[in-house]
Image (cartoon, helix red, strand yellow):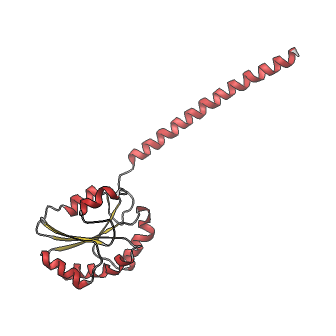
């Protein structure tokens, strides 16, 4: 019995020492891995999703297009997505406006609301297939409730949606357009 207790005690002592060493190594490995992950996260640029398409958060989009410093250019900004049938149907009209009004200082900007993960597999092939030539950006700002009303207090968030801006004049539309309807609205703000 004495030998059995000694054997059990010695085994427990050895086992617990080995276990502490394993815990220490595991803790060190977790700390090293965590440090490596954190340093990689810090080195990653904020918007490095795709070289093929600029990706903006709302503040960047707002500064560049919704509050432009150029009061002589008319901005026709359309919010759309590849999965939105009415959006896709009206895109050729925006492309035609871009062509017809390029000498009249009208700039068409198509703001995709597709998911950033879909840029390479869905958005870029869609742009190529439909031969879109307008300026296209992807809005990656998932908190839509915080920025939709900044585009227009009248916007419910439905797409397609278009805002036409020239200087301080702005007109917002939550609808799809025909070419003639779009041209009429642009002419009213030129």
User: In which quarter of the view is residue 78 placed?
Assistant: bottom left
Rendered residue at 36%/51% (across/down)? 45
Q: Left or right: where does residue 168 sit relative to residue 96?
A: left
Q: Nearer the viewer, residue 59 or 18?
A: 59
User: In which quarter of the view is residue 47 placed?
Assistant: bottom left
Could you tell me residue 176's position as x and y percent?
30, 78
Q: Left or right: where does residue 44 sit relative to residue 106?
A: right
Could you tell me residue 67's position as x and y percent?
18, 61
Direction right: furthest residue:
1
Rendered residue at 56%/36% (across/down)? 29
Direction bottom: furthest residue:
180
Query: Looking at the figure, which quarter contains the N terminus?
Result: top right
Up-down relation of residue 42 to residue 149 (above or below)? above
Number of numbered discs visible in the structure rendering: 0
Rendered residue at 39%/79% (across/down)? 129
User: In which quarter of the view is residue 126 placed?
Assistant: bottom left
Query: Looking at the figure, which quarter contains the C terminus?
Result: bottom left
Residue 101 appears anywhere in the view: no
Direction top: furthest residue:
2
Up-down relation of residue 13 to residue 118 (above or below)? above
Rendered residue at 33%/57% (across/down)? 145
Residue 4 appears anywhere in the view: yes
Could you tell me residue 84's position as x and y percent?
39, 74
Up-down relation of residue 122 to residue 69 (above or below)? below
Q: Left or right: where does residue 140 sit relative to residue 9?
A: left
Q: Nearer the viewer, residue 56 or 142?
A: 142
Q: Nearer the viewer, residue 14 or 97?
A: 97
Could you tell me residue 85's position as x and y percent?
39, 77
């Amino acid at each position: 019995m004495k030998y059995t207790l000694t054997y059990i005690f010695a085994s427990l002592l050895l086992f617990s020492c080995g276990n502490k060493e394993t815990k220490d190594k595991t803790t060190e490995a977790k700390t090293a891995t965590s440090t490596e992950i954190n340093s990689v996260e810090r080195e990653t640029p904020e918007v490095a999703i795709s070289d093929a398409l600029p990706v903006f958060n709302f503040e960047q989009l707002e500064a560049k297009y919704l509050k432009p410093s150029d009061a002589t250019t008319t901005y026709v900004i359309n919010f759309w997505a590849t999965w939105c049938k009415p959006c896709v149907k009206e895109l050729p009209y925006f492309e035609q406006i871009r062509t017809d009004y390029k000498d009249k200082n009208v700039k068409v900007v198509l703001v995709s609301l597709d998911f950033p993960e879909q840029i390479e597999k869905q958005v870029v092939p869609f742009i190529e297939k439909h031969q879109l030539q307008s300026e296209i950006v992807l809005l990656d700002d998932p908190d839509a409730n915080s920025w939709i009303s900044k585009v227009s207090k009248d916007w419910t968030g439905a797409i397609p949606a278009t805002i036409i801006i020239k200087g301080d004049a702005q007109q917002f539309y939550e609808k799809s357009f025909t070419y003639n309807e779009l041209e009429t609205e642009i002419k009213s703000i030129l």
